[in-house]
Amino acid sequence: MFIEIIKMAFESLLSKKTRTLLSMLGIIIGVATVIAVFAIGKGAQKSVSDQFQNLSANSVLITSNRARGVISSSKLTTADAALILESAENIKSAAGAIQGNLSVSYDATDKSYGVIGVDENFIDIANLKIENGRGIEIDDIDSRLMGAVIGSTVATDLFADDINPVGETITVGGKKLEVIGVIKKVGSRIGMISVDESVIVPSSTAEKSLLGSQGQVIINVLVDNIDNTALATSTISSVLRTEHGLKVNQEDDFRIMDAGSMVAAAQESAKTMSALLTAIAAITLLVSGIGIMNVMFVTVAERTKEIGIAKAIGGKQSDILTQFLLESVILSTIGGLIGITIGQLAIPIITHFNLIPLAASINGPILGFSFAVIVGIFFGFYPAFKASRLDPVDALRSE
């Protein structure tokens, strides 16, 4: 008997193909959206992890303060790194850098990359690894060497596979520089610049020949112990305010961010984005559920006489309830499966074109499909219940 009920439910849905498809459309979009939400959330978490995986837990980053135009009068310089190392408490090491963006070319290839001027300690403090060649040395800074260490993406973009970048000459901001090293791919950032898409040069070269006053100064500090981060941050602030001659009522012309705060802020942003997208997916499923309910009410109204005949020949209320409820569940289940398929297929496509960071998650399909079935049961029950309660005499009289 149950098999017959299922068969009748399918026949009913197939008899109104356009209506059935439109009813499933909301479920399809809703489930695909749920999968996208989890993929975006997991992708954002992975992006945060990749961005900070090379950042030591006891590191502190100091940059010029961009709030309300304060940067225009900022006195932060790369020389402040030596002052911090000498005067602040609980500091293991400190290295200054200056960063900006410039055109970088080799042969016919010309692209814009981040340029970072650093001292001899910066590559070690930033936990970067040299894959080929060498890093920046103190003699390079003293002599204002026109040389550069390039990131892995820069090396791939500018040079063919059969060319060793080390020893080649590139043009950075109109100046000729020799490539002295290549950094191993890391996926992290220094300030706002991706290490993989950067050209690292001696700080003296960046300040005098490439970036000048247009560059943004950053200082990377390592605290001697992670438990001393708060104390070190406080003393760094005091040292820099004194050095920059800031009055009590003046705002800092620098920003201090410890690794933990940066990771927490990035993760919080990822969570907020996921919560917003989850709300959108929930609304989509709710609207699709209301659409299914409306369709089922129309179906009941169209088949009132059929329900009367079924009851007149001995059909039970439970059978009629089951048939109409099954139609709703079948609608949402098939819609859910199609939504899962579309959502899962979209992830590798979007990832291939690097539109937004996505990562497949098993939670998305499971939750999306579960929501689809629940929506079918919840919004299909009342129309099915109403159909099962129809009086057979009144139903047979209906036109």
Image (cartoon, rainbow, N blue to C red):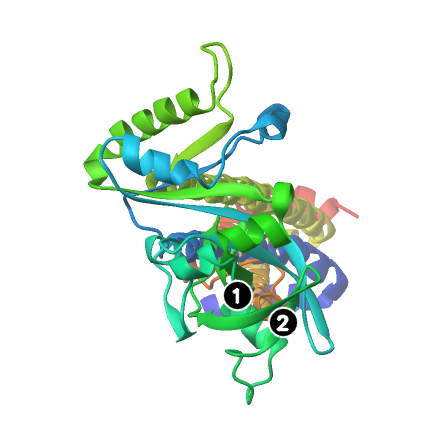
Picture coordinates of residue 328 (x, y %)?
57, 55
Q: Earlier in the sequence, mark 2 or mark 1?
A: 1
**10 Å crowding of disc 2: few (<14), some (14-19), many (20+):** many
**10 Å crowding of disc 1: few (<14), some (14-19), many (20+):** many
Number of callouts: 2
**Mark 2 lies on residue:** 170
**Mark 1 lies on residue:** 148
Q: Residue at x 20, y 40 (%)?
A: 225
Q: Which mark is on residue 221? A: none
The answer to whether 170 appears left or right of 261 in the picture is right
Question: Could you say which is closer to the camera, residue 163 or residue 28?
Answer: 163
Secondary element type, mark 2: strand
Does 235 sit above or below residue 296?
above
Q: Residue at x 63, y 55 (%)?
A: 29
Picture coordinates of residue 185 (x, y %)?
44, 68
Picture coordinates of residue 339 (x, y %)?
58, 62
Residue furthest out toward the right: 399
Q: Are marks 2 and 1 in contact (CB under 8 Å)?
A: yes
